[in-house]
Every structure is written in C-alpha cells, then in structure tokens.
Image (cartoon, grey):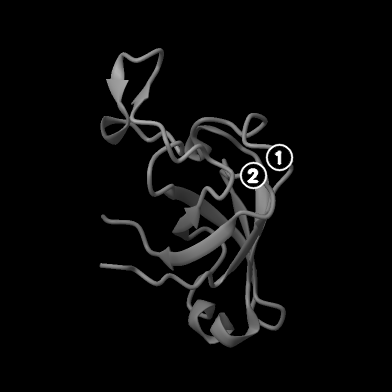
C-alpha cells in the first residue's frame, strides 16, 4: 500500500531548525505565513481575520525512526511529537490576515520549522 501526498504550499516561520520551534504552537504568540501554491489558492478565500485554521504539515526534518520519546517513557503515538514514522503534524493557528492574490495566510501560533511543507488546511472541530 502507498499513500501519495502532494503539499499545497509551505510555511514561513522564524524557526530555522526544529529545535528552535516551540513544542506547541497554540501556546505561543509566534507569527508566520502559510504560502499556498498557485494551483490551490482558490481554496483559501473563506478564511478571514480572527478565524482558527488547522495547519496540517509534514515535519520533513523529523527523525522517522523514533517509537519512544521523553527518555523512553512514552510511546510516540501517545504524544504530539513530530518525531515519528509518518511525521504528519497538526497546529491550530489564528488567522491574522488573508491575501488570496499571493496565496498567503498570515497566522499566529506557529510551531513548525521554516519551509515545512503544508499538506492541508482545515477549520477546527467545534
């Protein structure tokens, strides 16, 4: 079995490495941009300032061989660690601004390294 995933864009954040990024974005005020590729930009028009958006992203620099974290205390699947066999991550952010012309969502609450691929954007569960 295989799963084909096509990134819809990339994030721009102040964190050059994964070790610089905070452990949970919702607990921070760090801002960044989600840059949506041109062919997907028509899909962001309904987001507006103040909305919440779940950024589904790929931790492309994460260690994919990790099964135990926190000094072996926890199995990786019971945590939100980006180090895991399939480093798919979810970060709920606040939308600060939307520019549909250049495909940018300015967001607050980022926890991903600069340049991380974005797989999807979703509204949060109520």
Quadrant for the C terminus in the image: bottom left
In the displayed structure, 57 sits above or below 1; it is above
**Image mark for residue 113:** 2
- Residue 49 versus residue 20: which sits nearer the camera? 20
Say which element carries label 1. Answer: loop
Residue at screen point 52% across, 58% down = 50
| Coordinates of residue 38 in the picture (x, y in percent) | 64, 84
Left or right: residue 22 versus residue 66 is: right
Question: Which of the marked residues, 2 or 1, is nearer the chain's N terminus?
Answer: 1
Where residue 119 is drawn, which disc sits there? none
Residue 15 figure quarter: top right
Say which quadrant the N terminus sits in.
Answer: bottom left
Q: Position of residue 79 (x, y in %)?
A: 33, 31
Residue positioned 47% across, 65% down in the render: 119
Tag count: 2
Residue denoted by label 1: 15
Within 10 angstroms of label 1, few (less than 14), some, or many (20 or more) residues?
some
Secondary element under disc 2, as helix, strand or loop, is loop
Q: Position of residue 121 (x, y in %)?
A: 45, 66
Query: How far across and how far down the image is residue 6, in percent?
Result: 49, 73
Q: Residues within 10 Å of mark 2 (few under 14, many from 20)?
A: many
Q: Residue at x 46, y 39 (%)?
A: 82
Q: 47 or 120, which is in the foreground?
A: 120
Residue sitting at 34 percent across and 68 percent down? 3
Q: Mark 2 and mark 1: span between their CA atoms?
A: 5 Å
Task: Answer left or right for 41 relative to 87.
Answer: right
Image position of 36 with respect to 11: above or below: below
Q: Work out whether residue 57 or residue 25 is closer to the camera in this orientation and state it.
A: 57
Contact between labelled residues 1 and 2, with CB atoms less than 8 Å apart: yes
Look at the picture and state if 4 lies above or below 18.
below
């Amino acid at each position: 079995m295989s799963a084909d995933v096509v990134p819809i864009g990339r994030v721009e954040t102040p964190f050059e490495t994964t070790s610089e990024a905070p452990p949970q974005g919702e607990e921070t005020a760090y801002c960044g941009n989600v840059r949506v590729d041109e062919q997907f930009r028509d899909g962001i028009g309904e987001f507006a300032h103040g909305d919440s958006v779940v950024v589904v992203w790929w931790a492309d620099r994460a260690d994919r061989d990790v099964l135990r974290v926190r000094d072996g205390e926890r199995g990786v699947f019971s945590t939100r660690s980006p180090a895991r066999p399939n480093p798919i991550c979810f970060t709920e952010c606040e939308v600060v601004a939307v520019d549909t012309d250049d495909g940018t969502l300015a967001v607050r609450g980022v926890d991903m390294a600069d340049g991380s691929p974005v797989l999807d954007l979703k509204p949060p569960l109520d």
